Image (spheres, grey):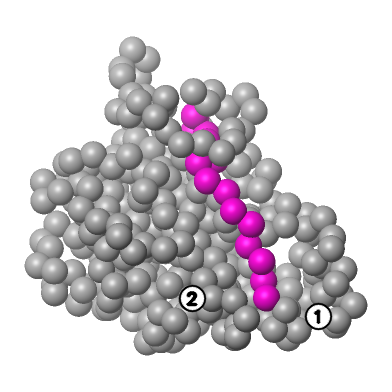
Amino acid sequence: MNQEETLKNVVRERYAKIAEQGKAENASSCCGATTPSNKVYNIMMDDYTGTEGYLEDADLGLGCGLPTQFAHIQKGDTVIDLGSGAGNDCFVARHETGSEGKVIGIDFTPAMINKARQNAEKLGYNNVEFREGDIDEMPVNDEVADVVVSNCVLNLVPNKEKVIKEIFRVLKPRGHFSISDIVLVGDLPEALRQDAEMYAGCVAGAIQKADYLSYIEQAGFRGILVQKEKIIVIPEDILEKYLSKEEIIAFQNGDTGIFSITVFAQKPGEKGTEDRINHENLQSGGCLPNSGCC
């Protein structure tokens, strides 16, 4: 078994267990995968309370942003959610796209797919479906989606560049994505980077922010915007599992930063055709130089 498959199995097994955990336990750890912290609650996740379409039973506390809030989903859109878990972002997206649209959730953990389908049945939604599969090889045809969203999932996939190319493939011309993810500025301590639990916890699998944005540009996307960014602080009682006191101090006072970012980008279309959204209304906390940001 190669390294990619080994990492995928680690994540799959861990998230099968997470599907049965409560939101409080998940949210007090790193994406639900590491030992819960007694010091800080909601290390990564944003609060969905008050978000229209939100279903508490579908919220396992695993996200690191609110990508649907920035996704500019329109009535009748087809939306794909990558790493859909118990269906939380799918149901929020369904509120935006309406009964005339369609939402497809993709997840490679059978327990998550089952949980999401049960939630959809409780809501009576017949235009939200969940497909089991890898997001680096989506069970979706070319140019199907108007919008792709994802919440703290790409960092869990070993080949992130392949996932971004897949997003480009499944989007229609002029379609776009809004994705929340974990990225790095600087290098993690080796003990964190090599630990399988920290990988499943969305930390060890994160790549450099500059590389992440570069992959998006290289895939052919334009109008790349960092819509939101926030720093992620790992509590000491989690770090103590991996680092000595001296190493913790060095890490906390060093140049390494762990960030949650929400990124928007658009797939080009034919010249002369109009964009589906008004770029002037996009919220932005930054922009990749020379990317054609509006």
- Which residue is situated farthest in the right direction here? 246
Amino acid found under the numbered disc labelled 2: Ala
Label 2 residue SS: helix
Q: Is residue 231 above or below residue 113?
A: above
Can residue 159 be seen at all in this image of the molecule?
no
- Horizontal and vertical percent for residue 3? 64, 71
Q: Is residue 129 above or below residue 111?
A: above
Q: Is residue 187 above or below residue 109?
A: above
Label 1 residue SS: loop
- Horizontal and vertical percent for residue 100? 11, 46
Quarter occupied by residue 291: top right
- Horizontal and vertical percent for residue 102? 19, 51
Residue on which the image places disc 2: 27
Amino acid found under the numbered disc labelled 1: Leu
Instruction: Answer whether labels 1 and 2 touch (C-beta < 8 Å).
Output: no
- Which residue is situated farthest in the top direction here? 272
Q: Is residue 106 above or below residue 174?
A: below
Residue at (39, 75) in percent of width and height? 60
Q: Is residue 260 left or right of residue 186?
A: left
Residue on which the image places disc 1: 243
Please rate how many residues cluster around mark 2, counting C-alpha atoms within 10 Å: few if below 14, some from 14 to 19, many from 20. Answer: many
Please rate how many residues cluster around mark 1, counting C-alpha atoms within 10 Å: few if below 14, some from 14 to 19, many from 20. Answer: some
- Horizontal and vertical percent for residue 142? 32, 43
Residue at (33, 29) in percent of width and height? 277
Q: Which residues are magenta?
A: 221-235
Question: Whole-Å distance between the Cαs marked 1 and 2?
Answer: 22 Å
Residue at (52, 26) in percent of width and height? 293
User: Which quadrant would the N terminus be assigned to in this image?
Assistant: bottom right
Residue at (13, 74) in percent of width and height? 122
Q: Main secondary structure of the magenta part?
A: strand
Quarter occupied by residue 273: top left
Mark nearer the viewer, 1 or 2:
2
